[in-house]
Image (spheres, rainbow, N blue to C red):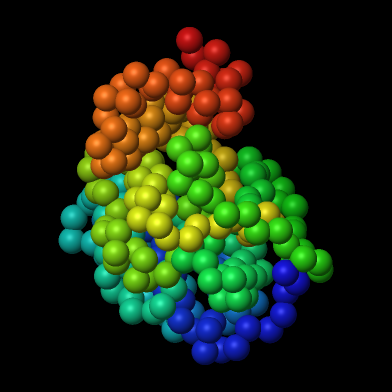
Amino acid sequence: MTLTTVPNSDVGSVDVVIPVYNAEKYILETLRSVAAQSSRQFRVSVVDDCSTDKSPQIIKEFCSVDSRFHYVRTDKNYGGPAGPRNVGIAIGNAQWIAFCDADDLWMPHKLQLQLEIAGSQGFDLLCGGIADFLDGAAIIPVSPPNEAVDVVPVSHRKLLLKNWIAMSTVLVKRDVIAAAGPFNEAKTHVAVEDFDMWLRLSGMGFRLARASYPLVHYRKLPTSISANKKMMIEKALNIIGDDYLRRGQQRLFDLIRPLHWLLYVGTSGWMRAVRRKL
């Protein structure tokens, strides 16, 4: 689907949630990328998880000059982004919810393209492609699409092979999130709370899809949790195990867990990294 103009009534029905913890180095750039959307009407809740750096000052100053942005501080530190996301979701009331991590950058066409596709094809959740960049490296701009964008359904079976859904690219219906319940805030789910949510949604029969066009510049940080590939695979397998448990198939998962490990490694392109860890 090519990019066209979206009516304001559609564009204005998006709540954007940005969880933040000690992100003074990146948050201003992130906020600017969201503000630069070609779709201009949306509301942003920037949820500060009790930061101890200069993030609050940076966010408040930005909010003071753009009325679409609102600073929210949690009453405790959740120790992960799930809690702040749940806080941000509860604040809003728009039909659609979008997420952005505090160190990622939205491309200007992100929301507009997603609203067009999701609205015309009836998806409950629509994610998209990402363009990786190393922290400190130059960012290569990506123009809006000038031809049809392929959209591929993300089935439950496909999700059991890998988390194909990048958090900062997600646009999802509010009533769908409400039906599934909040993001899991347990320490065991830090960095995989999103994968848990997508499996719950797909398991309930909601329509998930992925647009095969870059929507987000994803910052690669060597210190991030997701940089530890072996640990991330183990966390993902635990989430997959939870899904089997919900379906009453725990014994089956116990038998085929090694197969899931191999499949997840293979689809993620992490085999080389894992070998270095072993």
Front in this rendered view, residue 200 or 171? 200
Q: Residue 120 vs residue 48: left or right? A: right
Return the x and y of residue 68 as percentages of the image width and height: 45, 81
Q: Is residue 51 visible?
A: no
Quadrant into which the N terminus falls = bottom right
For residue 49, what is the image quadrant? bottom left
Q: Position of residue 141 (x, y in %)?
A: 74, 58
Q: Is residue 202 left or right of residue 1?
A: left
Q: Where does the image place residue 229, in percent across and percent down from the top left?
A: 48, 27
* Residue 179 appearing in the image: yes
Residue occupying image coordinates x 29% and y 41%:
247
Front residue of 59 and 224:
224
Q: Residue furthest left?
A: 75
Q: Is residue 49 above or below residue 39?
A: above
- Looking at the image, which residue is at 42% across and 52% down? 202
Q: Residue furthest top?
A: 278
Residue ID at (75%, 52%): 140
Residue 213 lies, with reference to residue 272, above or below; the image says below
Q: Position of residue 151 (x, y in %)?
A: 65, 59
Q: Nearer the viewer, residue 48 or 56?
A: 48
Q: Residue at x 52, y 26 (%)?
A: 263
Q: Is residue 187 left or right of residue 106?
A: left
Q: Quadrant of residue 64?
A: bottom left
In the rendered picture of this protein, how many numbered marks are placed on residues? 0
